[in-house]
């Protein structure tokens, strides 16, 4: 069966004309898909015979709401979406002054195994298709009756480990007749798969790149991020400089402050030395303590001191405002609970939100 929502306009046209249908049917079908049709039978301006043909050869991928949590503090909404095969992924909808932003998943689980990450601790099931990435945005937008202007690929999964589907998604999400979200409004976050960052830079897309650094050197980085053993920081920072050079887009570094692991003044100084002179910004995020990791967030004075030292080196940073702090807004946690609950009825209830 063909994944019709992952096809580009041209691919759909080619597919229909190869079957002997006129090319204008492609625009009609895409119009239905953009308006949220989940069944070919809804497409009542198509001949019955074409609908029947589509039903036997194609499917429309969906993300249906399995669970939803709305923050009492800031209206951040966290979704657990069910996909066509019953797998679940998480997305988070956030409201900012400039509009709505959604954080979407790119894989069911993740292979990268970062020790602080709920997704990494749950293993890997499969890649998402481009249409499943689109469906997360569409369902959230429809559910809240809003237009979403920004997308971050920062949910479950490593986007650069699902490179082709992510590139296809980036092509489709900009479609003016559909979501119409421009490249400059998209941020892709990666744990640092260097050859894929290079390949992305070659594409010269105008998307923002965020790199999860979380340490000032390879030794500390390798303690929490196995990928650091494959791609050392020097190579990673070289790839980030090249990304900036070929796209003109500033790179953001994510740095989760973990008490006693990567938050000392010495760590801040080392990071400052390495990032000095780069066109970049550091997002300092007090780590979300995930069950079973034993990691705790750094104290407030530590967070401030870390940022002050970076600024001594001319490195800009902000301690990230935590949105949805009452709803497990760090991706992977909701799904983990959901899986536990379905395995074991005595498991933790989704109603008892963890306070962070
Ligand atoms: N795989 C990509 C994108 C998904 S993770 C990546 O690693 O960048 C999105 C962001 O959440 C990353 O910066 C990741 O390091 C961070 N993250 C994961 N678990 C976290 C936790 N417990 N606390 C704070 N940040 C976390
Ligand atoms: Fe995967 Fe990113 Fe989590 Fe690491 S932090 S395990 S790369 S999702």
Image (spheres, rainbow, N blue to C red):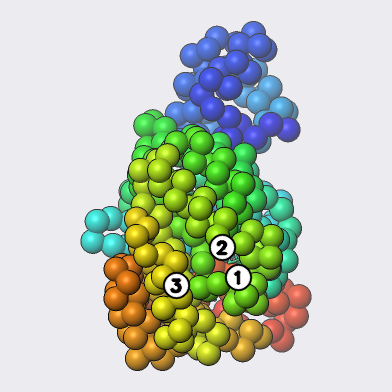
Figure quadrant of residue 81 = bottom right
Spatial separation of the CA atoms under disc 2 and disc 3: 11 Å
* Residue 317 visible in the displayed image: yes
Q: Which residue is mark 2?
A: 233
Tell me, for residue 218, which label it has, or none.
1
Question: Which corner quadrant of the figure contains ligand 2?
Answer: bottom right
Percent across and percent down for residue 39 are: 59, 37
Percent across and percent down for residue 347 are: 69, 84
The residue carrying pointer 3 sits among few (fewer than 14), some (14 to 19) or many (20 or more) residues within 10 Å by Cα, namely many
**Residue, x 72% and y 28% (percent of image)?**
56
Looking at the rendered image, the quarter that the N terminus falls into is top right
| Front residue of this view, candidates 36 and 170 | 170
Spatial separation of the CA atoms under disc 3 and disc 1: 11 Å
Q: Are marks 3 and 1 in contact (CB under 8 Å)?
A: no
The residue carrying pointer 1 sits among few (fewer than 14), some (14 to 19) or many (20 or more) residues within 10 Å by Cα, namely some
**Residue, x 67% and y 12% (percent of image)?**
19
| Front residue of this view, candidates 68 and 132 | 132
Vertical position of residue 45 compared to residue 135: above or below: above
Going from the N terminus, do you reach mark 2 or mark 1 first?
1
The residue carrying pointer 2 sits among few (fewer than 14), some (14 to 19) or many (20 or more) residues within 10 Å by Cα, namely many
Ligand 1 under 8 Å from disc 3 Cβ: no
Q: Which residue is mark 3?
A: 271
Q: Are marks 2 and 1 in contact (CB under 8 Å)?
A: yes
Please tell me how many numbered marks the rendered image carries.
3
Vertical position of residue 350 compared to residue 96: above or below: below
């Amino acid at each position: 069966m063909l994944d019709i929502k992952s096809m580009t306009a041209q691919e759909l046209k080619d597919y229909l004309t190869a079957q002997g249908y006129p090319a204008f049917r492609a625009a009609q079908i895409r119009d239905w898909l953009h308006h949220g049709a989940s069944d070919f039978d809804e497409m009542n301006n198509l001949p019955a015979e074409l609908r029947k043909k589509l039903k036997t050869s194609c499917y429309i991928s969906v993300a249906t709401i399995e669970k939803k949590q709305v923050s009492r503090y800031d209206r951040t909404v966290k979704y657990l979406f069910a996909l066509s095969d019953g797998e679940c992924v998480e997305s988070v909808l956030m409201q900012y002054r400039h509009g709505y932003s959604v954080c979407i998943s790119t894989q069911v689980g993740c292979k990268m195994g970062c020790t602080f990450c709920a997704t990494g601790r749950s293993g890997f099931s499969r890649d998402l298709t481009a249409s499943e990435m689109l469906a997360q945005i569409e369902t959230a937008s429809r559910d809240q009756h809003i237009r979403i202007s920004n997308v971050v690929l920062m949910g479950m999964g490593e986007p650069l480990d699902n490179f082709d589907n992510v590139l296809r998604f980036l092509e489709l999400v900009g479609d003016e007749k559909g979501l119409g979200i421009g490249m400059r409004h998209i941020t892709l976050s990666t744990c640092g798969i260097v050859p894929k960052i290079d390949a992305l830079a070659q594409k010269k897309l105008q998307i923002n790149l965020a790199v999860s650094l979380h340490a000032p050197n390879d030794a500390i980085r390798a303690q929490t991020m196995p990928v650091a053993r494959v791609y050392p920081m020097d190579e990673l920072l070289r790839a980030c400089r090249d990304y900036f050079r070929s796209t003109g887009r500033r790179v953001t570094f994510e740095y989760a402050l973990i008490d006693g692991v990567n938050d000392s003044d010495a760590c801040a100084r080392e990071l400052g030395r390495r990032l000095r002179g780069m066109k970049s910004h550091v997002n300092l995020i007090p780590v979300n303590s995930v069950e079973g990791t034993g990691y705790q967030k750094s104290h407030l004075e530590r967070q401030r001191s870390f940022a002050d030292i970076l600024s001594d080196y001319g490195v800009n940073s902000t301690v990230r405002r935590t949105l949805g702090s009452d709803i497990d807004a760090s991706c992977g946690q909701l799904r983990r609970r959901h899986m536990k609950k379905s395995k074991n009825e005595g498991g933790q209830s989704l109603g008892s939100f963890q306070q962070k």
